[in-house]
Image: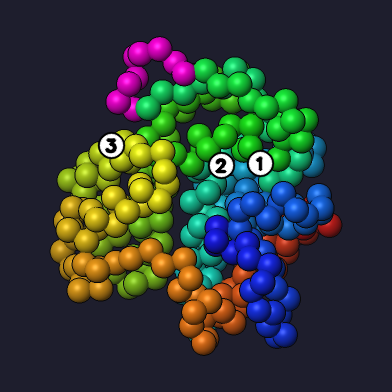
């Protein structure tokens, strides 16, 4: 999802090519910003009196729960692609909570401070947010990468004034996503054991490399060595890799991926229209 930013990707005539990834917003118009960020990264909670308030993303909102229920109905050849797309959006409701996928004063931040988990109790690190970002406050740009870093404890004068421990939020998301994946895989055991949750929480807190690719590599290593103690670890699990070009390198995957993209976009659009928010995306 986040890698879907290459404007040289082939076009598939059966459905329009739609971008969903990061960075594309820097080169598109405001209406196209909404088409990327609202349906694919900041699912609206539909809660509030104004349009800006209704478009704010909140963790496991009513619309997010509807998406979770919808995931259980997926079928067809693009099922796994559609599931991956929706799971990404659902997880982002925790990471991106209290921000919206439009340019809004509600995304403005002042007094941004952070601490890594292992340094809690020490002096807060203060950050100067660029005035340009707050003039055009889109998504969580004013919060830098803080919402997506699992190990971080942070706050600002506008949001999370008591401090937000990302690893606690991500544990909630992990439990919810695991249940959906277990149902999709017809696994009768839908909860992690207390020991597995301990290892997962430790990983969220301990893996602190600022380079997200390096963090990802450490996660892959822990999965490969069965650090999380899954009863059934296949040979495929033991050699798991992150392959950004996997979809585009296959003959059939691009069509299925873009079909899933279009179906998810249409679902979100229909939900917004039902809520009376037309022409948002």
Q: Residues within 10 Å of mark 1 (few under 14, many from 20)?
A: many
Q: Residues within 10 Å of mark 3 (few under 14, many from 20)?
A: some
Quarter of the figure that contains the C terminus: bottom right
Position of residue 5 measured from the top left corner of the image (x, y, whole percent): 63, 62
Q: Nearer the viewer, residue 40 or 197?
A: 40
First in sequence, mark 2 or 1: give its number. Answer: 2
Position of residue 187 measured from the top left corner of the image (x, y, whole percent): 29, 69
Quarter assignment of residue 181: bottom left
Q: Residues within 10 Å of mark 2 (few under 14, many from 20)?
A: many
* Residue in the picture at 23% in, 53% down: 222
Query: Pointer 3: what residue?
Result: 206
Position of residue 28 measured from the top left corner of the image (x, y, whole percent): 78, 54
Q: Identify the secondary structure beneath mark 3.
A: helix
Query: Pointer 2: what residue?
Result: 96
Query: Pointer 1: what residue?
Result: 139
Q: Nearer the viewer, residue 22 or 57?
A: 22
Q: CA distance from mark 2 to mark 3?
A: 21 Å
Q: CA distance from mark 1 to mark 3?
A: 27 Å
Quarter assignment of residue 171: top left
Q: Is residue 243 visible?
A: yes
Quick check: 102 above or below 83?
above
Instruction: Say if mark 2 contacts mark 1, CB within 8 Å.
Output: yes
First in sequence, mark 2 or 3: give its number. Answer: 2
Q: Which residues are magenta?
A: 117-125
What residue occupies the far front of the structure in this picture? Answer: 8
Front disc: 2 or 1: 1
* Residue in the picture at 61% in, 58% down: 21
Instruction: Say if mark 2 contacts mark 3, CB within 8 Å.
Output: no
* Residue in the picture at 53% in, 76% down: 248
**Image side of residue 180 versus residue 147, left or right:** left
């Amino acid at each position: 999802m986040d890698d879907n930013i290459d404007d040289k990707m082939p076009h598939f005539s059966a459905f329009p090519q739609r971008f969903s990834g990061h960075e594309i917003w820097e080169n598109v118009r405001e209406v196209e910003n909404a088409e990327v960020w609202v349906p694919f990264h900041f699912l609206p909670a539909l809660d509030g009196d104004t349009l800006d308030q209704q478009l704010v993303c909140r963790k496991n909102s009513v619309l997010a729960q509807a998406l979770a229920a919808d995931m259980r109905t997926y079928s067809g050849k693009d099922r796994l692609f559609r599931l991956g797309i929706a799971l990404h959006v659902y997880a982002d409701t925790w990471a991106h909570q209290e921000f919206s996928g439009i340019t809004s004063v509600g995304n403005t931040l002042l007094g941004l401070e952070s601490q890594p988990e292992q340094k809690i109790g020490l002096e807060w690190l203060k950050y100067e947010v660029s005035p340009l970002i707050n003039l055009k406050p889109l998504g969580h740009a004013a919060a830098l990468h803080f919402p997506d870093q699992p190990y971080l404890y942070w706050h600002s004068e506008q949001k999370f004034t008591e401090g937000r421990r990302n690893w606690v939020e991500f544990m909630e998301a992990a439990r919810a996503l695991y249940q959906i994946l277990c149902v999709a895989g017809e696994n009768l055991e839908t909860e992690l054991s207390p020991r597995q949750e301990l290892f997962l929480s430790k990983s969220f807190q301990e893996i602190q490399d600022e380079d997200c690719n390096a963090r990802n590599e450490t996660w892959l290593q822990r999965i490969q060595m069965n650090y999380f103690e899954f009863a059934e670890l296949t040979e495929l699990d033991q050699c798991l890799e992150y392959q950004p070009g996997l979809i585009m390198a296959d003959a059939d995957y691009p069509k299925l991926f873009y079909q899933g993209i279009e179906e998810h976009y249409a679902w979100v659009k229909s939900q917004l229209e039902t809520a009376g928010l037309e022409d948002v995306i």
